[in-house]
């Protein structure tokens, strides 16, 4: 699986481990687009972080794309 974070400033970060991606968002205050790619599906979430915890605000899962 691949985890991609897009920050408010447009900076893109890629992670191979979910825990590292979550830790990054928890430590850095802001709003993020969080994209999970798995198999033929992707999940897109909007995450808001206050610098101490990351809270999922909205999630959409798209599956079986070619």
Image (cartoon, rainbow, N blue to C red):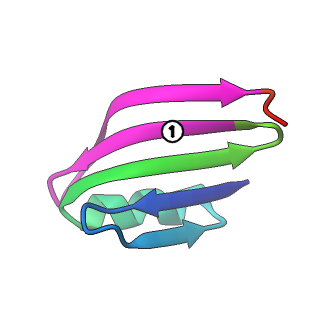
Please identify the quarter of the rendering in which residue 62 is found.
top right
Number of labelled discs? 1
Give the x, y percent position of residue 51: 17, 61
Near-viewer residue (10 or 60): 10
User: Residue furthest toward the front?
Assistant: 66
Q: Position of residue 13 (x, y in %)?
A: 48, 71
Magenta-drawn segment: 42-63
Residue 16 to residue 52: above or below: below
Q: Is residue 4 magenta?
A: no
Q: Is residue 62 above or below residue 15?
A: above
In which quadrant is the C terminus drawn?
top right
Along the viewing direction, whichever of 22 and 6 lies nearer the viewer: 6
Main secondary-structure element of the magenta-colored stretch: strand
Residue located 68% across and 47% down the image:
37
Q: Residue at x 66, y 39 (%)?
A: 42
In magenta stretch: residue 56: yes
**Residue indicated by mark 1:** 44
Is residue 54 shown left or right of residue 13? left
Local SS, label 1: strand
């Amino acid at each position: 699986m691949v985890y991609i974070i897009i920050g408010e400033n447009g900076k893109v970060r890629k992670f191979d481990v979910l825990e590292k991606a979550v830790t990054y968002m928890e430590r850095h205050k802001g709003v993020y687009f969080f994209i999970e790619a798995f198999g033929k599906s992707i999940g897109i979430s909007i995450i808001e972080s206050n610098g101490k915890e990351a809270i999922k605000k909205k999630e959409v899962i798209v599956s079986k794309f070619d």
